[in-house]
Image: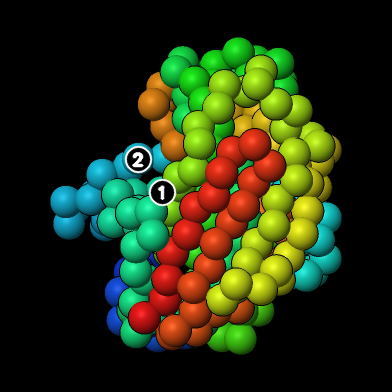
Amino acid sequence: MNLSAATIAQLAEHLDNCQRNAQDTPKITDQYPDMDWDDAYAIQDAILARHLGRGARVIGLKAGLTSHAKMKQMGVETPVFGFLVDEYSVSEGGEVKVSELIHPKVEPEIAFVLKHALRGPGCHIGAVLAATDFVMPGIEVIDSRYRDFKFDLKSVVADNTSASRFVVGGQPLRPNQLDLRTVGIVLEKNGEPVALGAGAAVLGHPAAAIAMLANHLGARGQEIPAGSVILSGGITEAVAVAAGDNVCLRVQGMGSVSLRFV
């Protein structure tokens, strides 16, 4: 690690305040170009500690930048990982207040819910599928705290991979009831299709993102707990939204899930 504990705490407070006050900021590597991966995840951990200190509860995890389309859109080359707390969860068909966000975008995802804990190293797609209770459609609302949604990988990791809100719903299915590689999705905004894709857009198979997350946590002495909700990453590019928009994700064989922005 290249940053001091005091600097990590200061940056965590800064990014946490940006999220709470819906204010943007230049990416933090502009000021701290020597920040390394351990620093970035330490800042993310410190932000999580601030959430927990306010009474939040961890309910899941997320993988980000897992599709080639998303990597190209954001100019990056590898996935990143973050946490989900209960205050991010939106009920199916529920409202998201844009006044609480900076520049929200939505991503269509496949959500996994685990019946058994997963731990790396050596986790693979088969192990993920065996540990999965069910999968379901999910919409993640991402909202980078960085100005103009411009960041590098270390900055976005520190910012908890742009996490802000999410909704899951539709028809839960056992993973052996469908082929997650070929399952098709349609993301609609105000009744019009705005993105199309298939599960294979996420690293060839959405479960590959979960395996990478388990291996990432395993290297840090952690695991994905049983019961976790895990967002496997955007299948398509993210789509910008504004107040008045209604967003619906339809997933082949899994029904639909929706939310609206007010």
Residue type marked 2:
Ile
Residue 254 in view, yes or no: yes
Q: Position of residue 17 (x, y in %)?
A: 32, 75
Q: How many labels does the image show?
A: 2
Tell me which colouring the rendered structure shows. Answer: rainbow
N-terminal-most mark, 1 or 2? 2
Label 1's element?
strand
x, y (%) of residue 109?
61, 49
Q: How far apart are marks 1 and 2 (CA)?
A: 6 Å
Q: Say which mark, if any, is on residue 84.
A: 1
Q: Label 2: how many residues lie within 10 Å, few (<14), some (14-19) or many (20+)?
A: some
- At label 1, which amino acid type do we have? Leu
Q: Where is residue 105 in the image (x, y as percent from the top left)?
A: 57, 72
Which residue is at a point 79% across and 35% down the rendered structure image? Answer: 181
Q: Name the residue under label 2.
A: 59
Q: In which quarter of the image is residue 234?
A: bottom right
Could you tell me which quadrant the C terminus lies in? bottom left
Q: Could you say which quadrant of the image residue 88 lies in?
A: bottom left
